[in-house]
Image: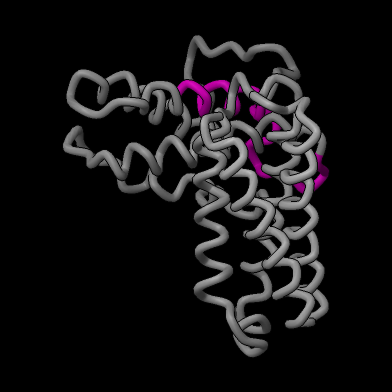
Amino acid sequence: FFFSTRRRHTRSLCDWSSDVCSSDLYRDIQVDAAVLAALAQIAPDYADAPSWKKNALLVRDVAAELGRESSSVGEKFYKPAREAYDKLDSLLSGSVPPGLESGPPKMQFVNISPRYPLMKRFERAQTYLKGSVNNADLLKKEADKVQREAGMVALLAQVILSEGYDSADDDLYRELVSGVREGALKVVAAARDQEFDAYTAGLDLMYKSCTKCHSEFKNN
């Protein structure tokens, strides 16, 4: 369910139509670009990957470029970021801009998806899950989206456990991030099986693990 639409992971990119962009929009672009870069890295390993799977490594590299170029606001930074966006838009549409060459088949996630924007994606998912799905009826109604959002958290938690990220070899860090992943997977299963008590337990584990991780590793 990670790859089911072209735009799901680039929602902020759709609104980028001029160089008069807010800092909030740039931050959203960084989040979406970091997530898309991580997804593109693993897309070749999934049978149900998107239509752009054949160009996944190019999508990965250009999404990472977009994330880097979107780190500052203003006219000076708009042009290179917009150029990266246009390349990415073409790739997601099935066209390969001339002159693009992909990097190696596998790269360290830390080099394509900085942890900070991935953490912001965690926050986006948790805000939705805690604020919008708070009873059994809503869990039934929102089951598909709950599974997508929690599944994304589980996947990105696994990403930030990989080599290269700060504290990735720290036992407490690994325990807490693994708790986030475990809680998210419990939420996925609970939404699938329509078990609201299990959903709240998984969400609680995910939230507490994430909160403690932020507290213990707030400077990283």
Specify the quadrant that holds the C terminus. Answer: top right
Residue depicted at 69% across the width and 58% down the height:
206
Residue found at the far bottom of this picture:
137
Magenta: predominant secondary structure element? helix
Vertical comparison of 35 with 188: above or below: above
Determine if residue 201 is in view. yes
Is 91 rendered above or below residue 186? above
The tally of labels here is 0
- Tell me what residue is drawn at x 57 percent, y 44 percent: 215
Q: Is residue 49 visible?
A: no
Q: Is residue 188 above or below residue 36?
A: below
Frontmost residue, 20 versus 113: 113
Q: Position of residue 181 (x, y in %)?
A: 75, 51
Left or right: where 175 falls relative to 145:
right
Percent across and percent down for residue 103 are 65, 12
Magenta-tinted stretch = 46-65
Is 151 one of the magenta-colored residues? no
Task: Decide which of 175, 71 is in the foreground and name it.
Answer: 175
Q: Quadrant of residue 25?
A: top left
Residue drawn at x 80%, y 55% as measured from the top left = 182
Above-or-below relation of 36 to 145: above
Q: Position of residue 4 (x, y in %)?
A: 65, 54
Could you say which quadrant of the image residue 74 lies in?
A: top left
Residue at the front extreme of this rendering: 216
Q: Name the residue at 72% across, 37% down.
A: 173
Quadrant that contains the N terminus = bottom right
Q: How is the image coloured?
A: one colour
- Is 219 situated left or right of 155 in this image? left
Is 197 or 43 nearer to us in this picture? 197
Q: Taking 29 as reference, is 167 left or right?
A: right
